[in-house]
Image (tube, coloured by chain):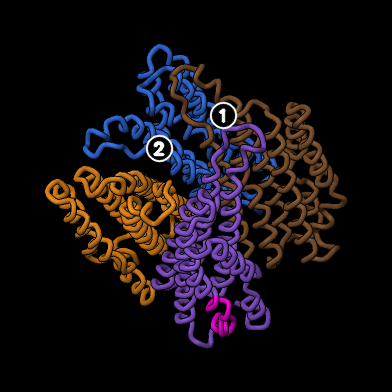
Chain colours: A orange, B blue, C brown, D purple
Amino acid sequence: MGKNRLEAFSDGVMAIIITIMVLEMKVPTGTDLAALKPILPIFLSYLLSYVYIGIYWNNHHHMLHTVRQVTGTILWANLHLLFWLSLFPFVTGWVGHNHLEPAPMALYGVVLLLAALAYFQLQRAIIRSQGADSLLAKAVGRDIKGKISPILYASAVPLAYLSPWCSAGLYIVVALMWLIPDRRIERALMTGEHV
Amino acid sequence: MGKNRLEAFSDGVMAIIITIMVLEMKVPTGTDLAALKPILPIFLSYLLSYVYIGIYWNNHHHMLHTVRQVTGTILWANLHLLFWLSLFPFVTGWVGHNHLEPAPMALYGVVLLLAALAYFQLQRAIIRSQGADSLLAKAVGRDIKGKISPILYASAVPLAYLSPWCSAGLYIVVALMWLIPDRRIERALMTGEHV
Amino acid sequence: MGKNRLEAFSDGVMAIIITIMVLEMKVPTGTDLAALKPILPIFLSYLLSYVYIGIYWNNHHHMLHTVRQVTGTILWANLHLLFWLSLFPFVTGWVGHNHLEPAPMALYGVVLLLAALAYFQLQRAIIRSQGADSLLAKAVGRDIKGKISPILYASAVPLAYLSPWCSAGLYIVVALMWLIPDRRIERALMTGEHV
Amino acid sequence: MGKNRLEAFSDGVMAIIITIMVLEMKVPTGTDLAALKPILPIFLSYLLSYVYIGIYWNNHHHMLHTVRQVTGTILWANLHLLFWLSLFPFVTGWVGHNHLEPAPMALYGVVLLLAALAYFQLQRAIIRSQGADSLLAKAVGRDIKGKISPILYASAVPLAYLSPWCSAGLYIVVALMWLIPDRRIERALMTGEHV
């Protein structure tokens, strides 16, 4: 009930976040390839954020698959997640316009951390509305990836002041860890009852 | 008949309004945390407007749930509501770029007021097309929240010239009042017939 | 077959066109109401274009209602229409930033004219794919409004060089003429077979 | 399973890409027709990219029609395609702001090439998930257009340094070649089993 619309709205917001991030790559004034050089860090930060939004869309897609009834709590937990995702263009732009400076790199981690916690809350809200023996609860299981990620983001924030490179490395590692879509849910959907 | 498309279009507009408001938070030129300080009021005004758009989306979602047939009047009442919502990025930007100045604060209230009246008209149009004993009519009941909000917005407009702080406070109070989704409709849907 | 997706894509493009037009209303630097004065013509041109996009969305909505099968010709006729609609933000901005100058006013009419012709072609493509005794063919009938509009737009283009005010007046008259959604189709849907 | 959402997200991203490209056409400061002259190359590059996005949307639409089950591989192959498409506004802006300079023209070809390869991979991923005797496999057949296009794009990249005009000509030729939607799939859908 109303699930389609929750998905459509979330898809809309995530699709716009992705395309708005591209706007940070301003058209260069020069006409040779050298003019692209200052855009390279912006391109790389866009690429990383694109992958993160892709991961969120992907896992969101799998998670909502298991939802039968949308409650008010789920609606607001979802809006909470989208709020932090909507800050991606801002932090991506700040990281991209500066060469691995501590403050932008730390803020990027803060937004990643708050988005991850919001995702966790949304997952909890869905499981709570379905009961502890629900499909999602079984699929998520102990949720090791979901618990390690916030810890790594939280470590990357102070680390940015020691070595921005290490923070950037951590963000890339977590992204690679999640690039594999949530096969746990996919598997549970296959073996378990059809939703 | 056609309801899905009305929802999809409204979702699209609201999703874009939210993400376009973020564009007011320009990437700062500085690279330390102090560079974020001038962005803080823009962030706070974005947060408030995000919550308002979230509330509208939420209640819109619940209200359209009860619609069976979309008439021309409902289509235009909906477009009328979306028009005032589309001005949110402009007034949010004006409020955010100034520290609690009277005129931006008053204009913010004017747009909130006109959006609230448009929502009220849309609600009326839906009830009229369904009959006075419809599900939505019962669910809305005396609609106390819906009647208090415009009064509070209308009070906040002149008040902005006395104390912008008080206006800002009123806007936050109304937002908190609405943060609870329209449980009246949710309850009526549960107990009443399935739509 | 595929009709939902055609609608969803068109809704997306029209929703974004509407919200992107708002971006022309730049946040003023002043903090009093006088700072809004230069924005007033931009607001008025936005309002007119918003009504036009609303009319197109509304009629598009009614027209696609009668489509059973989407052909390649319909897909491209639809993309052709969306192309001219996508130029609305540009011409709206040019009209809004200038006080009734001939050239922007004339170009506004050119884009309105080309969008109207593209809409006409889309209508033809749908009727052709359905047969001359189709629901849409009956509903459209002699299509007086659809034939008068392009003539009025075409007259407004040269007229802009004599009197931009008259062109603006013509654009407003045509918008008012169309504000009433295509009740012909609505009526035919009611009395005719259910689509 | 989940196919609707994949389509909705892709539609959203492509709809936004199209409308964001228009933003490169900045409102001119002059008020006569001569003020439009510097915008003409931007308009033409927008037109070409609009046609390309239209072609991608059209073929994507036909291709996904044959998909029954969305796998993780298909999801990511689709996100990979959307990534290269999301760079269209940037390269279109660079081409449009310069009069047929080699580097922008070459980069345009690089993005077209990478998008074409991503489309090819997505097609492969769908066929692999369906089996070699699937509807799409039969419909695509030897896929001559799909194999010629990347070769032409790859030729246009170095050619841009000899003659940007020739590269531009090649991009237009390939667009015209694809303007005809993938009738192979349409035909197979008609004669073959209903999907």
* Residue depicted at 57% across the width and 33% down the height: D29
Q: Nearer the viewer, residue C74 or A169?
A: A169
Dominant SS in magenta: helix
Q: Please tell me whether residue A95 is drawn above or below residue B176 in the rendered image.
A: below
Q: Which residue is mark 1?
A: B117
Residue at disc 1, secondary structure: helix
Q: Quadrant of residue C39?
A: top right
The answer to whether dots 2 and 1 both sit on one chain is yes
Pointers 2 and 1 in contact (C-beta within 8 Å): no
Crowd tier of the residue under label 1, counting other residues whose Cα lies within 10 Å: few below 14, some 14–19, many 20 or above:
some
Can you see residue D131?
yes
Left or right, A100 with reference to B194 = left
Q: Residue at x 27, y 46 (%)?
A: A98
Secondary structure at numbered mark 2: helix
Chain for mark 2? B
Residue A71, image x and y in percent?
A: 41, 50
* Rendered view: B90 above or below D157: above
Q: Which residue is disc 2 drawn over?
A: B51
Q: Earlier in the sequence, mark 2 or mark 1?
A: 2
Give the image location of residue C26, x and y in percent: 49, 31
What residue is rendered at 12% in x and 48% in y? A162
Front residue of this view, candidates D153 and D54: D153
> Which quadrant would residue C77 be assigned to in this image?
bottom right
Query: Quarter holding the C terminus of chain C?
Result: bottom right
Which contiguous range is marked in magenta?
Answer: D136-148
Magenta region includes residue B67: no
Q: Chain of mark 1?
A: B
Direction from residue C26 to residue A76 in the image, left or right: left
